[in-house]
Amino acid sequence: MSFVRRAFWPRAIGLGVGFFAVAGVFWGRGEPLWLWGALALYCYVWPLLAYRIAANSHAPYIAEQRHVLIDSLVAGFWIATIQFNVLPTVMLLSMLAMNNTAAGGVRFVALGILLQVLGVGLSVLLLGFGFSPKTTPQQVYASIPMLVVHPMIIGLVLYQLAIQLAKHKKALRELSRIDNLTRLFNRGHWKELLQFEFEQCQQLKQGASLALIDVDHFKSTNDQHGHIAGDMVLRLVGERIAHNLRSEDLAGRYGGDEFCILLPRTSPERAQEILERLRSDVATLQCDEAPNLSLSLSIGIAGYEQHLTDATAWLREADRALYEAKRHGRNRIMLANMLTNDEWVTGSTPA
């Protein structure tokens, strides 16, 4: 329907002001009343009829293309009827060229020209041939509304399309960054954010923490309760992650049942406090698809260190901490900077 509405207004307004351009030629020439009536019907009734036909069609775009071709045929009729008066003829041809190009490109321009010729032939058969190209001042004044209004309407339509296109591009860009299941960043975009944060830490000498999270015994959940329950678990954990983090924290789904979080300007100890709230929150979750299922998280945290050569090395430190959290019983948080001293930071009793 939005496409049909976009097609309606340029046609309705363009033909509405185009009436005066043709009427300016008719005026004083003693044209028959039926010709005036046909002009009024085409300019003021046809746009409404075309709108209704397209709106009720199963293929509105194809219906509108047919209407553009009908416009070409009828415009050819009026061009010959006003005896090729220069200014109105040029305006009609320009309007048709824009409409045909927008409707179907070069092919439609060629079809439109053919139908204009047929329209000219129809007028000659009905009314005879006449050639009076001179445009009088009166006819110039009658053409002014079309000269001013129609280009303005086309410009407005193009502006609205540009705004809509920008919105669609933004929506597509967001979709390309988001994991469909958890609504967190996907792996590809999150790794771009990781690289950026690593460079910021290097350049500004600031701290940050990186956490990798694993849903404990997720494979068993899939095996025992099915993949629908598994998807529900991932969705619930994603919601809890988004709920418990700060606005500046960056969370993503790293893959499978693993999540990843960047906590800018945050020490590992502070990150542990934030993620402990998350771990405790997830432990209270209930999954409708598996009411008796107990959920827990294993979390590895690595703070940024100057000796890290690249973002991958930082990620490797967090992964090593996560591995130790799982190796020491799961359902706990490990800090990478404590591993060498064998100092384990634990949560509740492992599941």
Image (cartoon, grey):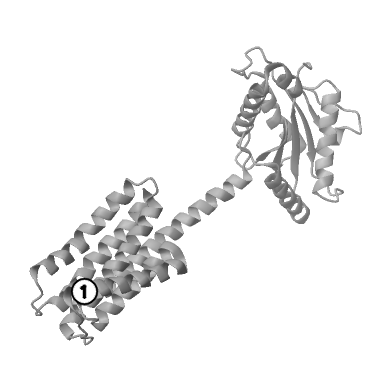
The residue carrying pointer 1 sits among few (fewer than 14), some (14 to 19) or many (20 or more) residues within 10 Å by Cα, namely few
Question: Which residue reaches farthest front?
Answer: 125
Q: Which residue is drawn at 40% across and 58% down?
A: 160
**Residue 86 appears at what percent x and percent y?**
26, 83
Kind of residue indicated by mark 1? Leu
Which residue occupies 68% across, 31% down? 274
Q: Label 1, on which residue?
A: 125
Question: Left or right of 21: which side holds 304?
Answer: right
Which residue occupies the foreground of this view, 178 or 308? 178
Could one spot residue 315 in this view of the protein? yes
State whether residue 314 is above or below residue 138: above
Which quadrant is the C terminus positioned in?
Answer: top right
Which residue is found at the position 46% from the left and 69% from the top? 106
* Image-based side of 100 in relation to 308, left or right: left
Query: Which sits in the foreground, 169 or 42?
Result: 42
Tell me, yes or no, if residue 145 can be seen here. no
Residue 277 horizontal side relative to residue 23, left or right: right
Label 1 sits on a secondary structure element that is helix
Residue drawn at point x = 74 percent, y = 54 percent? 204
Q: Which residue lies furthest to the top in this view?
A: 292
Q: In which quarter of the image is residue 35?
A: bottom left
| Closer-to-camera residue (191/175) | 175
Position of 97 relative to 316 (above/below):
below
Q: In which quarter of the image is residue 74?
A: bottom left
Q: Position of residue 118 (x, y in %)?
A: 30, 71
| Residue 109: % across, % down | 41, 70
